[in-house]
Amino acid sequence: MSRQAETAQPRETPALTDRGNARKEAIREAALRVVGNKGLAGLSMRAIATEAELPLGALGYYFKTKDDLILAAFELHTRREADRMLKAVMGVGVNADAAEVAEKLATFVQRGLTEERTSLVAEYEFLIESTRNPELARISRAWRQALQMQISHIAARLGSDDPETDAEIILSIVAGLEIDHLSTPPDPATRQAIRSALSRTISKLWLRDEG
């Protein structure tokens, strides 16, 4: 092979080892925690390195810029939230009533406000920034479409005559409940209010003939 042919061959980026993948994941996790605790304004490569307990120079090996890391962290969060929503509504049958569906979605909201609170705060930081960042906006749209597809599938199975619109309404209610109660952990009265709001909404939308 000629020298010219040799130089024309593309160089492949070495695949990350298991340790490398674990470290990259730890960096994204750390970025989510920093954004959730300090906001995007408090996000810096140094803060992420400290949170991940890694040398500052190690971050540059996996992410060239802070913007790359922000996108990677948001993608991680959206994938997890899509999976969490799927698990929340999994098993809803054609004979489900409003209370059952509402209970599953209420559990999803309540867990977001408690166990996943730091990630949920980070989520809204990312969403606000997406109004100025086209790449974040692209990820947000794709995630919203995935969630809407999940909920519209449930709505269709339960007899909705407009599953896509009903899914849009449900997701808007879920987002509103998250925002309204994000500042403080939900107490028993708040948990019941969340459940009641979802139950009433779902009943009005597509389970009018239940009971």
Image: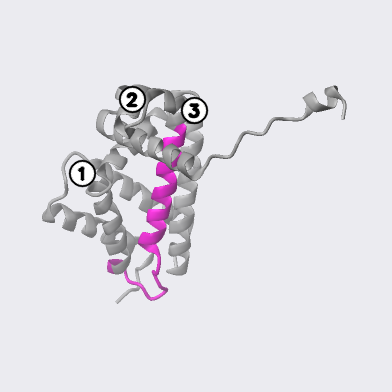
Q: Residue at x 16, y 49 (%)?
A: 186
Depth order, front residue of 85/7 = 7
Q: Position of residue 4 (x, y in %)?
A: 84, 22
Q: Nearer the viewer, residue 172 or 6?
A: 6
In whole angstroms, how far apart are the C-alphas of marks 1 and 2? Answer: 24 Å
Q: Residues within 10 Å of mark 2 (few under 14, many from 20)?
A: some
Mark 2 — residue? 43
Count of numbered tags: 3
Q: Residues within 10 Å of mark 1 (few under 14, many from 20)?
A: some
Residue at the outermost right position: 2
Q: Please give the range of residues in magenta.
A: 71-99
Mark positioned earlier in the residue sequence (3 or 2): 2
Question: Which residue corresponds to mark 3?
Answer: 61
State yes or no: discs 1 and 3 in contact (Cβ < 8 Å).
Answer: no
Is label 1 in a helix, a strand or a loop? helix
Residue 133 is at least partly visible in this image: no
Q: Which one is earlier in the sequence, the residue at label 1 or at label 3? A: 3
